[in-house]
Amino acid sequence: MLDEVITSHPDRYGAWSEGSVDDLLEFLLQVFTRPVLLPLLRTGAPDDEPAVRACFAYVESLATDPNPYVESSVHFGILEQFLEGQDVLLRAWHHSLPETRTKLVAMFEEYPTTLRALRAAGAAGAAGATGAADGAEREQAGPTASALVRDLIRKCFPEQRDAILALEQDEREYADSVNQPAAEVGAYTLISEVFVGEVLKPLLETVPLDEELANRCAHFLERLSELGSHSPFIKELTSIRVTDHLLGHPENWAKLRPHAGKLLRREVRERQVHYSGPFPV
């Protein structure tokens, strides 16, 4: 499968057949995780799908490699990419092989609410995965966690209303296809696809920086952090999907830091120990 993908990009990935890639992290992101693995997980491919088995066998082979460079590339290029949404995360957990699952557990040790949902999903099987995650959210943050995040996004970024409506429509269509009641769009999905995907990433790629939008993002993150002070679930998703996105590329934090409020700055200070800088102080 990888050879087929690489064939379409011979100039960039021709060295794959020779066992040599200049940047393994970028290679995994651009050739494997984003174009191959994540689409399979988004569609909920069945257990016996050969492509799913092949992908997770490949991930397992990388996860067992003791090389620190490979280990870091797998962590950021594959495992953290599962965090784009709750369904993707739980399907990845369900399909993962022993060493990969061990690394997922290690990644989530500091996120007990999320880890609890993963373990519940593993016990329940694929059919109960989404329900287990929803239950963990309700248990830890109350039944309005997704609604709180959704309403905050709408208030701070009214231009993203259509993006939220599209996600809700997708949820209804999926529910109809499996003859089940539609669930709320999860808070992880809202933060990943609407805030990070539609607002934060485009902002950080804009030159010069849109100061007005940067201020709105900072305000949103302060309000989200306030919600997180009362909800372990929201606090964890903020760290996983937002803070780690800022610190994974220090230039992102350098751009947003002048606009950041005290709660976001405190969160970044706490999370910096997991990353190599240098970071602006």
Image (tube, grey):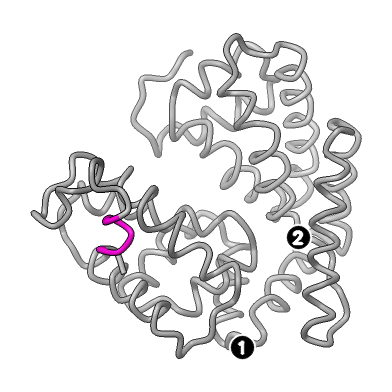
Q: Is residue 76 visible?
A: no
Residue 4 in the magenta stretch? The answer is yes
**Mark seen at residue 207:** none
Name which of mark 2 and mark 1 comes first in the sequence.
1
Residue 209 higher or lower than 80, as above or below: above
The residue that disc 2 covers is: 186
Foreground residue, 130 or 102? 130
Quarter residue 122 falls in? bottom right
- Percent position of residue 200, x then y: 65, 31
- Percent position of residue 85, x then y: 63, 59
Q: Is residue 23 left or right of residue 256?
A: left
Mark 2 or mark 1: which is in front?
2
Q: Is residue 79 left or right of residue 210?
A: left
Quarter residue 220 falls in? top right
Foreground residue, 42 or 61? 42
- Percent position of residue 219, x then y: 78, 24
Residue found at x 69% / y 75%:
130
Q: Is residue 115 visible?
A: yes
Residue 264 higher or lower than 129, as above or below: above
**What type is the residue that disc 1 sits on?**
Ala
Q: Main secondary structure of the magenta part?
A: helix
Q: Residues within 10 Å of mark 1 (few under 14, many from 20)?
A: some
Residue 67 higher or lower than 91, as above or below: above
Q: Residues within 10 Å of mark 2 (few under 14, many from 20)?
A: many
Foreground residue, 99 or 60? 60
- Percent position of residue 262, x then y: 68, 21
Foreground residue, 109 or 203? 203
Total number of numbered discs in the rendering: 2
Residue found at x 81% / y 78%:
175
Residue 68 in the magenta stretch? The answer is no
Residue numbers of the magenta segment: 3-7
The residue that disc 1 covers is: 124
